[in-house]
């Protein structure tokens, strides 16, 4: 705790990131309840009104209040990002652990691990966004399918990172001592290797949340994600971009800012977590 407080005092950027993430999580809970207008109610009389005291972020081409839509969209975008990352983590960590535990030792399990890595090579050979868009196109543009697609393309990240950590940890003296003591593979993996390998993977999870939010917004931007009138930052940016050529900048600017600030916050928190979990980086 002392080091955490010291780090925050001397790294204001980390404090800013924590504040942003905290504010985002608060909006996930209360955003739809504090929105001053119905985020899905169109009013063509109020179409494309510039920011004012009544509509502080202005209105879009359908007359919907942009501020209400931006703070309501936080729940959907962050929920998709967190859910997709959680699925990737839960699937990727055990696969990476097993692949790293038996990798290079021969036998069926080692071959299975190598086969898994080659499958991941194939998956990662495709551009991530194009692959996610193809998955959503095949399964349908529902929130559940977007979560599944974003989770699927992020699984290789956690598998590879966990495998690399396990390959390094399994050569340490305390693991060799556990093997010599007659511990089972399951006990060695759960009690010795996993606790000493998972820190960097947890750090990656925070960064992946931000990346998943960007990917979700990108899918909606091209029409392959969450569809209107559901408030979602990517679709709001896409709709607002059509009006920018005629000088109406606010429909796409404010959701874009919300997206950028949120992703920045999660990225900074991920870097902060890396420093806290790795004593070697402490100065």
Image (spheres, rainbow, N blue to C red):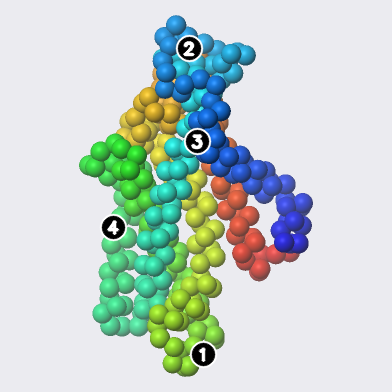
* Residues at marks 2 and 4, CA–CA distance in whole angstroms: 46 Å
Farthest left residue in view: 138
* Mark 3 surroundings within 10 Å by alpha-carbon count, few (fewer than 14), some (14 through 19), many (20 or more): many
* Residue beneath disc 4: 122
Task: Write down the residue under mark 2.
Answer: 48
Query: Residue at 28% across / 76% down in the picture?
Result: 111
Which is more N-terminal, label 4 or label 2?
A: 2
Q: Residue 282, can we see it?
A: yes
Q: Is residue 68 left or right of residue 10?
A: left
Which of 135/80 is in front?
A: 80
Identify the residue under disc 1.
177
Please report whichever mark, 1 or 3, sits nearer to the chain's N-terminal start.
3
**Earlier along the polypeptide chain: callout 2 or callout 1?**
2
Packing grade of label 2 (10 A; few <14, some 14-19, many >=20) is: many
Q: CA distance from mark 3 to mark 2?
A: 22 Å
Does 164 appear above or below 144? below
Quarter-wise, where is residue 135 in the image? top left
Tag on residue 74?
3
The crowding category of the residue bearing disc 1, from other C-alpha atoms within 10 Å (few below 14, some 14 to 19, many at least 20), is few
Disc with the residue nearer the chain's start (4 vs 1): 4
Task: Give how far apart the Cα atoms at labels 4 and 1 are.
Answer: 37 Å
Residue ID at (40%, 49%): 84
Q: CA distance from mark 1 to mark 3?
A: 49 Å
- Residue 262 in sight from this viewpoint: no
Q: Position of residue 125 (x, y in %)?
A: 32, 54
């Amino acid at each position: 705790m002392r080091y955490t407080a010291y780090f925050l005092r001397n790294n204001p950027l980390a404090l800013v990131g924590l504040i942003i993430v905290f504010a985002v999580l608060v909006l996930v809970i209360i955003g739809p309840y504090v929105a001053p207008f119905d985020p899905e109610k169109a009013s063509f009389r109020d179409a494309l009104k510039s920011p004012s005291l009544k509509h502080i972020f202005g209105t879009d081409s359908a007359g919907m209040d942009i501020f209400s839509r931006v703070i309501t969209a936080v729940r959907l975008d962050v929920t998709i990002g967190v859910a997709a990352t959680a699925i990737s983590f839960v699937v990727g960590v055990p696969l990476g652990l097993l692949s790293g535990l038996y990798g290079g030792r021969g036998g069926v399990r080692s071959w299975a691990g190598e086969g898994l890595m080659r499958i991941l090579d194939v998956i990662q050979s495709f551009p991530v966004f194009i692959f996610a868009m193809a998955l959503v196109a095949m399964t349908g543009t529902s929130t559940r399918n977007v979560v599944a697609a974003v989770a699927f393309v992020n699984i290789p990240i956690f598998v590879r990172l966990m495998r690399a950590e396990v390959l390094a940890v399994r050569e340490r003296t305390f693991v060799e001592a556990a093997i010599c003591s007659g511990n089972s593979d399951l006990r060695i993996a759960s009690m010795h290797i996993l606790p000493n390998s998972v820190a960097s993977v947890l750090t990656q999870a925070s960064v992946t949340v931000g990346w998943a939010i960007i990917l979700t917004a990108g899918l909606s931007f091209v029409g392959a994600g969450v569809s209107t009138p559901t408030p979602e930052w990517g679709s709001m940016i896409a709709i607002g971009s059509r009006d920018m050529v005629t000088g109406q900048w606010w429909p796409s600017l404010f959701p874009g800012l919300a997206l950028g600030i949120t992703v920045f916050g999660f990225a900074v928190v991920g870097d902060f977590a890396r420093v806290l979990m790795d004593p070697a980086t402490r100065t």
